[in-house]
Image (tube, rainbow, N blue to C red):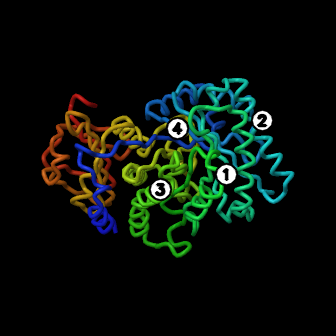
Amino acid sequence: MRTAIKSQRAQVPVSTPAPANGARMRLRYGLNIGDHWRDPASALARERLITRIKDAKTALLRIFPGIEGTPPFDHWLECAVFFDAIQRTGATPMIAFSCPQAWNDSGAVRKFSQQCCEFVDRSIERWGQREVASWFWSIGDEPNSPWTNGGLTFEGYRDIYQATAQAIQQRLGSPEGRPRIGGPCVDGFQPFWFDWIWRFVEEVDNSLIGFVAWNRYGDWREAGAWSAPTDPEVFERLLLSRTSEYWSRAQAVGVLLEGRGILNLCSELNAHAHNDPAISSRFNQGPLGAAYYGSALIDLMRGGADGEFLWAGACDRGPYSALGADGEPTPTYEAKKLIARNVRFGDVISFPLDRDPVPDLDAVVASDEEGPRVAVVVYLGSGACTLELDRWPELAGFSQVTSIANRGQLRSDPLPAALALGAYGVALLHHQRDV
């Protein structure tokens, strides 16, 4: 499947820029902490979490201030302490508000907007209007999902969004450019998910929209359930084949947003969405999760997305956690750190395998005025492979390779002419001086 997709890419010149005139890397790296920000209770655990966030060059941090449906200000003191710690990471918070279940009750909608605004007011009192206006404010979480939305229609969501966004905008003042308010963080598994984004942009006053957000996972099913393959290896191959959808979806949303000044954000990203750790953790937290995430990042860069949020959890024994409650990293976190520290915002990027594809393989090259500076190579196969790097001139001039071992440790070696990759490999090619 990937071979066919990459062959199609090769026929579209705009998607395959050469290093000399390549695209600028515009993707901001993020982590989705969700509503588990209270889990790292001890000071030591919180310090480890802050260190991990900083080490991965995290630019964006998505947080749900309400917990299990409670109003966001119910946990204000705890939340304020955590946000004080976040300030030290340098990451910009995205505050995520889930829509009320009683969406067709006008009183409930007014109360929801008031609660959101109270959180904004308290934030301004503590950190100042200018700082809070630089944060992202997200209204709605998978409002198109019949599993969780209580029957919410787009019309209902639109009315909730407009009322709440207008009230938040009034409190944020008039920052330069658009207010950083947006949504709808659609569930990408649902049919007609794009309808919600199209209608959101077309039917809501664009002066109230600073970003459009969408969630995308590889799968949500258990092997053998809901018509999923029963063979684990087949299931894994099917899941990994879907990383190219981050490219196609980012590109489709980008075309819709062209000329509007609205950011294009993938607001949740991980290999598997099931909330039972026994099912999903092996996909999200091991080598397969690292390769899935690395491949998805490359496709988000290729599609021109402005930001991504890896569902990191930061909770003990969670299904998604790239970080545990004690800040312990996984191979997925190490892949994030390796890529984010080396393929940087504003780099000139190109994709050499678009012109000469290989199944289960992808790469991005980041260049400066002196030529290719680093390259990230991701291998989605379950067996070993060897690459003759001379086949791709952009990959052939590096001297070192840093790769992720099975337990997440990084290993650096001199780069041979033939690069050997193990199952689900993520590797950084670089010059010795650069890493």
Secondary element at image label 4:
strand
Labels 1 and 4 touching (C-beta < 8 A): no
| Vertical position of residue 123 compared to residue 416: above or below | above
Which callout, 2 or 3, points to the residue nearer the camera?
A: 2
Secondary element at image label 2:
helix
Which callout, 4 or 3, points to the residue nearer the camera?
A: 4
Disc ID at residue 58: none
Secondary element at image label 3:
strand
State the image coordinates of residue 290 (x, y, percent, origin top left): 40, 49
Per the image, the residue denoted by label 1 is: 140
Q: Residues within 10 Å of mark 2 (few under 14, many from 20)?
A: some
Q: Earlier in the sequence, mark 1 or mark 4?
A: 4
- Residue type at mark 3: give it: Ala
Q: Earlier in the sequence, mark 2 or mark 3?
A: 2
- Residue type at mark 2: give it: Glu
State the image coordinates of residue 80 (x, y, percent, origin top left): 69, 28
Residue at the image point whose x is 60% and y is 58% from the top? 202
Disc ID at residue 118: 2
State the image coordinates of residue 195 (x, y, percent, origin top left): 59, 65
| Vertical position of residue 137 compared to residue 144: above or below | above
State the image coordinates of residue 246 (x, y, percent, origin top left): 44, 57
Disc ID at residue 60: 4
- Of 362 and 427, the residue lying toward us: 362
Secondary element at image label 1:
loop
Q: Residues within 10 Å of mark 3 (few under 14, many from 20)?
A: many
Q: Earlier in the sequence, mark 1 or mark 3?
A: 1
| Vertical position of residue 198 compared to residue 389: above or below | below
- Of 80 and 228, the residue lying toward us: 80
Q: CA distance from mark 2 to mark 3?
A: 35 Å
